[in-house]
Image (cartoon, helix red, strand yellow):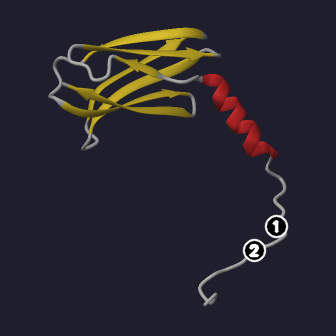
Amino acid sequence: EDNDRVHLDDIQISGCTNANAKIEDEALQLNELFIYPNPANERITLAYNLNDDANVTTSISDVSGRIVYQNTSDKLAGEQTEEIAVNQLSAGLYIIIVRAGDLNFLKKIIVE
């Protein structure tokens, strides 16, 4: 039966231009984040490109959400690399979060 279904037709959405502009602005601030090597056992390198100067916070948290590393610094526009020692971390899965302005990038890494 169709009693549990809703059928929609002729839907118009307007007034979304600001949402699209915000997405474009955020995409311009921090391009894709690369992390290598992954898996890692001593150090990882983060690489990304900033189109504008930004205050960048890099965090690493374990799977329980506990922050095991955090660094904040002002970065100039351009290619960025950051090396982080992971040899003091226990083997396992970690989440790296890079924040630049309102934009967050999350990546998983494995420490062996």
For label 1, the residue is 11
- Residue 8, numbered label: 2
Q: Where is residue 45 drawn, in percent x and y?
A: 37, 13
Q: Which quadrant of the structure image shows residue 40?
A: top left
Compared to residue 9, the image places residue 93 above or below, namely above
Which one is in front, 21 or 73?
A: 21
Q: Is residue 76 something that shows in the picture? A: no
Q: Residue at x 75, y 41 (%)?
A: 20
User: Is 18 displayed left or right of 72 in the figure?
Assistant: right
| Mark 2 neighbour density, 10 Å: few (under 14) some (14–19) many (20 or more) | few
Q: Residue at x 57, y 28 (%)?
A: 101
Residue type (three-letter) at the residue carrying disc 2? Leu
Residue type (three-letter) at the residue carrying disc 1? Ile
Q: Where is residue 64 drawn, in percent x and y?
A: 24, 44
| Mark 1 neighbour density, 10 Å: few (under 14) some (14–19) many (20 or more) | few
What is the distance, in whole Å, between disc 2 and disc 1 at their CAs? Answer: 7 Å
Q: Where is residue 107 drawn, in percent x and y?
A: 40, 32
Residue at the extreme front: 1
Which one is in front, 75 or 5?
A: 5
Q: Which quadrant of the structure image shows residue 31?
A: top right
Labels in figure, total: 2
- Residue 27, numbered label: none
